[in-house]
Image: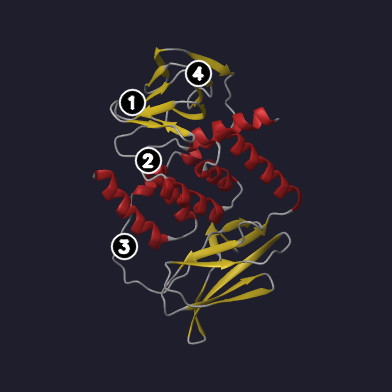
């Protein structure tokens, strides 16, 4: 079961990165993981960097291993997992790996599991374009439609509409008074509860409600925003899978964030992505997936600000 789970996760994460997410780059060709010993990669054939965690490979990259060193790569198109042997130099082309020296062998059979995710994640590039509006700004409140929380990740977030406003969050019968803040994102720690509940947010000024979170519309119908608490066996299953990820990929925040997304743990995914990108500022090609989570959470202000910074960084 562990081997199957690892294969599913790797295939999922590779497919997750389908989409043109970085200027001048194509889809990732594969993901490198389980680097043992001296394993390095280069983007331009000049500067080599040590592989310290799982790494997504694009066309034009090269990978080399030292004496007694190995690494594994799962390919995007085929799902094949390859093993790079010691003293090898591997070139990444648009659709495959080529051994310029050393050895490259198939380690596991092909898997087409979760190939349906390709359509879901193929629009990542759309999150690098801001559609500007010239309408007069008014007080509006928006929040994620459905989100899951746990004991370790008990936070709900939403966009701060202004430092002069405070809020009230209602989850079922429980109300939270949220003070005004100058932070761009309002963040509220929620107490554990059972199952799934509707939630509401009110924006207050001078003790009076200014605006309230409205039900969202989908396919002609209106639905309440919901929050669920993950506990019991589901929580145990998530912990087990996170441990499996850590065993395969190490303490890789981006991998764990991808898994959190699949559980609707959107705030946890955002926190993981932010930490990963802060620790790995050269991984610019992965930033649009944080943008996608911002949009899911309706954090439009921080999304727009960081998008402009990302565009500047990719030009420099």
Q: Residue furthest bottom?
A: 206
Mark nearer the N terminus (3 vs 2): 3
Q: Which mark is residue 68?
A: 4
Mark nearer the N terminus (4 vs 2): 4
Mark nearer the N terminus (3 vs 4): 4
Residue at point 54%, 22% (across, down): 81
As displayed, is residue 188 above or below residue 167?
Answer: above
As displayed, is residue 70 above or below residue 55?
Answer: above
Dot 1: what SS? loop
As displayed, is residue 9 above or below residue 206?
Answer: above
Mark nearer the N terminus (3 vs 1): 1
Count of marks, rendered view: 4
Q: Position of residue 309 (x, y in %)?
A: 31, 53
Q: Position of residue 131 (x, y in %)?
A: 33, 55
Question: Looking at the image, is mark 3 or mark 1 nearer the viewer?
Answer: 1
Residue at point 68%, 31% (across, down): 2
Residue highlighted by disc 2? 285
Question: Looking at the image, is mark 3 or mark 4 nearer the viewer?
Answer: 4
Left or right, residue 239 beside residue 260: right
Give the colour scheme of this rendering. Answer: secondary structure
Residue at point 41%, 32% (across, down): 50
Residue highlighted by disc 3? 133
Mark nearer the N terminus (2 vs 1): 1
Residue highlighted by disc 1? 60
């Amino acid at each position: 079961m562990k081997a199957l789970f690892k294969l599913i996760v790797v295939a999922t994460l590779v497919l997750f990165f389908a989409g043109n997410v970085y200027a001048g780059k194509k889809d990732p060709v594969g993901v490198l993981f389980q680097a043992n010993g001296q394993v390095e990669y280069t983007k331009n054939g000049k500067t080599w960097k040590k592989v310290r965690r799982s790494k997504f490979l694009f066309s034009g990259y090269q990978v080399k291993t030292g004496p007694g060193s190995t690494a594994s790569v799962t390919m995007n198109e085929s799902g094949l997992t390859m093993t790079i042997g010691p003293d090898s130099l591997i070139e990444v082309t648009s659709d495959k790996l080529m051994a310029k020296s050393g050895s490259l062998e198939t380690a596991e059979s092909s898997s087409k599991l979760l190939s349906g995710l390709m359509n879901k994640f193929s629009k990542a590039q759309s999150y690098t374009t801001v559609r500007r509006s010239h309408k007069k700004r008014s007080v509006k409140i928006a929040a994620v439609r459905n989100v899951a929380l746990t004991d370790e990740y008990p936070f709900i977030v939403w966009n701060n509409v202004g430092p002069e406003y405070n809020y009230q969050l209602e989850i079922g019968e429980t109300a939270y008074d949220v003070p005004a803040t100058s932070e761009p994102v309002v963040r509220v720690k929620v107490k554990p509860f059972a199952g799934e509940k509707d939630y509401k947010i009110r924006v207050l000024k001078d003790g009076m409600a200014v605006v309230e979170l409205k039900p969202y519309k989908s396919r002609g119908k209106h639905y309440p925003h919901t929050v669920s608490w993950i506990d019991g066996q589901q929580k145990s299953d998530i912990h087990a899978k996170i441990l499996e990820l850590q065993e395969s990929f190490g303490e890789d925040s981006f991998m764990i964030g991808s898994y959190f997304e699949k559980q609707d743990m959107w705030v946890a995914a955002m926190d993981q992505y932010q930490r990963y990108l802060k620790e790995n500022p050269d991984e610019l090609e992965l930033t649009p997936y944080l943008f996608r989570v911002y949009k899911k959470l309706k954090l439009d202000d921080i999304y727009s600000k960081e998008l402009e910074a990302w565009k500047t960084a990719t030009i420099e």
